[in-house]
Structure formats: C-alpha cells, structure tokens
Image: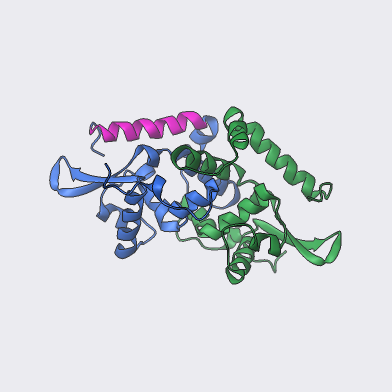
Chain colours: A green, B blue
Amino acid sequence: MFAVQRSRQQSHRSGCPIGIMLDMLGDPWTLLVVRDLMFMGNRTFGEFLLSGEGIASNILSDRLCRLEANEIVEKRRDPADARRLIYALTEKGIGLAPVLVEMILWAVEHEDTGAPPKMIRAIRSDKAAFIGGLRSAWRAARRGRVSR
Amino acid sequence: MFAVQRSRQQSHRSGCPIGIMLDMLGDPWTLLVVRDLMFMGNRTFGEFLLSGEGIASNILSDRLCRLEANEIVEKRRDPADARRLIYALTEKGIGLAPVLVEMILWAVEHEDTGAPPKMIRAIRSDKAAFIGGLRSAWRAARRGRVSR
C-alpha cells in the first residue's frame, strides 16, 4: 500500500475540480481510451490501437500508464490466456460514465456525428438507466462472466 | 453567413461524438477558459490570464481563437468601454454546463479538491436547478443586465 503513489497525494496545479480532472484527462487520447473501454468493449493494447482514430503505439503506452497511475484503469492477466494483458476501468474509471454521456449529448446536439441513433434515443429517454446499463456491463465484465 | 467557416463543415477524424468533442476541447487550457467564462464570470483576456493556473498569453490567444472558430465563444466590444474586448459563451458554449458539472462531481468524489462545499451541495441536491442557474446567469449577462 505504502509503495504505491496514490493520485490523492499528487499535487495538482490548483484545487479546482475541473483543473484536477484535466490534469488527469485533458488530452484527447486519454479520454478516447476511456471511451474504448466503456463503450467499445476493447480490452487489449492491440484493440485500442485499431480503434479508429489511429493512435500511435508510444502515445497509447504513455496514456495507459498515466491512466493506471491515476487509478482510472487497471491491468491484469487475461484469465483465459495468461500470456495476454487486459485492461479494465476501475470504480473511479466507470465513474466517468456521466461525463462521457454528457459529452455525447453535447456533440450530437451541435455537430454532425456518426453516433448510433438508437443509443442517442436511449440516453435521451432515460439517462440514469443508460448509465446504469454501462455500470452493469462493467460489473459483469469485471466478475469475468462476460468474456466480450 | 457564407464567408464563415462553420464547424459543422469541418472534417473530424471520426464520426464518434466523443472524438468530435475532443477535437474541439481535448486540451486542458481550452476547457479551463470555458470554466472561467461559466463559473468565474471572467470576460477579458487579462482576467483569463490571471485566473489561477498560469496560462501563457500565446496559448490563451490560440485557445480563444479556436473556441471562436468552433462557435463556443464569441467576442465583442464591451458596451461600457468600446476599447475593451469581452468574451462570452455562445448557446453552444453554455450547453457545455452539464459536462463541466459532471466533471466537478467526479473530481470531488475521487480527489481532494478545493471546490466550494456550498456549490457541491447545491449540485448534489438538484443538478438540473444548478445547471438552470448557470444558464440564467449566462442569459442575463448576455442581455447586458449584469455587468459582472
């Protein structure tokens, strides 16, 4: 426990909660990795690499390290294949669901996006239920009951 | 109208709404400027410069330009002093309130922040009313009825 550098002990440039969040996540790639974990079901380094926006492998490595250091993502061996490392959101990581959902709603409102209309309808008709669904999927995947 | 490069016509690296948002705002300073406009009542270049995190003036210029190009911020002459330029959130800009509010809640939940406890209580007790209050303040400032 004592050997781990906890993010709570890290110094932030100001006490502002938005500033603190941006110290951790104020980088486009960082939040796209969180998105991949939350919505795409991506779990491996290779899956993140292939996920659309064309992240470079050195940037991906760096962002995954930072997400782990900030306890938003955790890494473990795949129970189904011990040679493989898989990544998952922590409790703190899945806690970002309301932020990402509001980001989706804002972008869909103001820009032309390729967001699935069914998902947007689901968010608009019951936001809390949609976020609850993301949490349930995360919890089930964490217990290893859903392999993908 | 036709001379203005609208953000809707800009190409985004993917159709993903989160990716599109991060193309516009995936930079720590950009969202801190939005925060200053939304919560601090800052309106001038000088006020943004002094607002706490120590943004450099060239970075601030660049981010304000980008926010204007993306129609999140608009610039006009101060009616009270025509020599002075003031910045304000557009309708699209104030639409970011739910995103920033969720960012605040997440940061306060997981980190030690200096967020005013009274504000956090207000958000937790009635999020919609809190966001409505931000919108009302924005609308009043826009009509010029509130000078600060």
Image spot of residue A144 (x, y percent):
83, 50
Residue B134, magenta (yes or no)? yes
The residue drawn where x is 70% and y is 66% is A2
The residue drawn where x is 15% and y is 40% is B80
Q: Give the residues in magenta.
A: B127-144
Residue at the extreme front of the image, as rendered: B2
| Quadrant of image for the N terminus of chain B | top left
The residue drawn where x is 63% and y is 57% is A51
Residue A107, magenta (yes or no)? no
Q: Nearer the viewer, residue A60 or A76?
A: A60
> Is B50 positioned to the left or the right of B20 in the image?
left
The answer to whether residue A19 is visible is yes
Image spot of residue B134 (x, y percent):
39, 35
Looking at the magenta stretch, what is its main secondary structure? helix
Image spot of residue B126 (x, y percent):
52, 29
The residue drawn where x is 25% and y is 55% is B46
Image spot of residue A3 (x, y percent):
70, 69
| Quadrant of image for the C terminus of chain B | top left
The answer to whether residue A15 is visible is no
The image quadrant of residue B56 is bottom left
